[in-house]
Amino acid sequence: MSKILKGTMLLTAGTFLSKFLGMIYTVPFENMVGTEGTDLFSIAYVPYSILLSLSSMGVPVAVSKFVSKYNSLGDYETGQRMLKAGLTLMSITGVIAFLMLYFSAEQVAIWTIGPDSERLGHATMVIQMVSFALLVIPPMSITRGFFQGHESMAPTAVSQVVEQIVRIVFLLASAFIIVQVLGGPIHQAVGFATFAAFIGGIASCIVLYVYWRKRKPFLENQLQAQEYTYGLSNKEMFKELFTYAGPFILVGIATPLYQLVDQFTLEKAIKASGAEYNNAFSIINFLSHKLIMIPVTLGLGLSLALLPAITQAFTKNEMSRLNKQINQALQIVALLIIPAVVGLSVVAWEAYATFYGVDHIEYRGDLLRWYAPVGLFLALYTVTSSILQGVNKQNFAVVSLGTGILLKISLNWWLIQLLGAKGAILATGIGVAAAVGLNFWRIFTTIEFAYKQLLKRTLLVVILTAVMAITVIIVKWLLGFVFDPTENRLHALIVLILSIGAGGIVYLWTAYKTTLLEHVLGGRVRVLNKFLKRS
């Protein structure tokens, strides 16, 4: 196995494990603090995510690209100077972001829940607690990028996993001690839960420092063997770096921006309509969002793995190969994510009850049912934005993202007044769908894209997904004579596993029989031959 392939697999595995852990911890956390606590948690994390994106998102990949470029030219000094200058810059931006969030915490809380809310002090404290993480994570991210530029993926993969494990252990332990042992207030437990991001960041920094000490002799030998340096000034280095980083920042802040619109309007709009708020913000943007990211992650890994090949084909002007690579990336998204989001929508009540309990399942399960299809558009936005970067049209992401956000802002209040919390979901769906549509338009006008094959196979996916959904509905109906998933969490788990299992088998079998799997995934499906031999 090549060093590059091994490194890519290691980094992908570390990222996936980190994301998986980030989803699983919500189950015990929600059980301890309830939706009231997760609402406070969400209020703090959305502005934190945006400031984190602006201060560091895109830097690991951008620094990796920068260091890799100059290493390939034999100029190792420039890469190491970028690390030192970048650490200083990211430390400064981290401090600025920390000060902005810490001292604006009360104003953010006022914008979110209003100046007269009894939760104002609690929300302010929670936002201030999470702001400390901004001191350590931006400089940490540039160190990860430096190692990646040296084709060393282990430091990033290991530090990601360690960061997440330490964060989750501190988060759950502090919440348990405060709520269960000491009988303390929920907002105090949530404050320490958000502070866990800082603790996890410190743990990650320690891991990266250990790797740095271990690799230092090798890096010094590179410098001694160097024969030429380009002698770039700091200004020239940062100008090149930010050219690489810009597109990644836009993609990174897309979802938090949509959530920020909800944060500042959802509770106020619901209460203005005379309805009960019922912690809808965290139910949609934290608890349900974690669940829809499960199917989204299924397709993104495979499709995004094709994007380096897309960049290479476009650079070499190999249009036939470029068409094939883009088609395959989009077909993988359709093949895996369409049935996943439809399936989650069909079993929304059972899924929500299994993970978060049966309380108010009619209301909360319905919100998940509405939100699940949005996962498809979120996945398509990420993939199409990356394709735009591959064909050197990354700046168009500003137009598509801006259009989507403007639609979200203009529609949100009106749709919430009309449909309640579901209106916020619909506004997000319309905004992201518009951004995806614009990205597709730009891709199609940039290259002569042959889309007929994509349309045909997507139509087949839709038909097979409909068959799968009907199967799931029938299985749920039959199991309903024995189990009641709205009253019992164990019953919900049983119905979820059996119905999704039946639907998944039907979809896999029909996709295999129609040769859809083979055409989209190629040789990857050969492992199924001994299980699903076609007659």
Image (cartoon, rainbow, N blue to C red):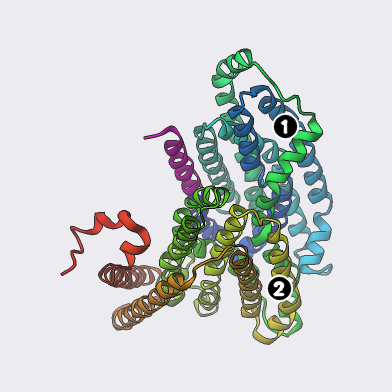
Q: Is residue 2 magenta?
A: yes
Marks 1 and 2, the one that precedes in the sequence: 1
> For the residue marked with disc 2, what is the amino acid?
Lys
Residue 511, x across and y down, in percent: 31, 69
Per the image, the residue denoted by label 2 is 408
Instruction: Give the prevailing secondary structure in the magenta stretch.
Output: helix
From this view, report whether residue 526 is shown above or below residue 509: above
The dot on residue 87 is 1
Residue 212, x across and y down, in percent: 59, 24
Q: Is residue 379 magenta?
A: no
In the visual, does 393 lie left or right of 346?
right
In the visual, does 458 lie left or right of 88?
left
Residue sitting at 78 percent across and 34 percent down? 236
Identify the image quadrant of the N terminus.
top left
Residue 348, x across and y down, in percent: 46, 74
Residue 54, x across and y down, in percent: 73, 50
Q: How many marks?
A: 2
Query: Depth check: 369 or 322 in front?
Result: 322
Cα–Cα gap, marks 1 and 2: 36 Å
Determine if residue 332 is in view. yes
From this view, report whether residue 234 is shown above or below residue 53: above
In the visual, does 293 lie left or right of 234?
left
The magenta segment is 1-18
Query: Depth check: 508 or 349 in front?
Result: 508
Quadrant in the rendering for residue 98: top right
The dot on residue 396 is none
- Tell me the SS state at disc 2: helix
> For the residue marked with disc 1, what is the amino acid?
Leu
Quadrant in the rendering for residue 141: top right
Identify the residue at the far top of this view.
224
User: Callout 1: 10 Å neighbours few (<14), some, many (20+)?
Assistant: some
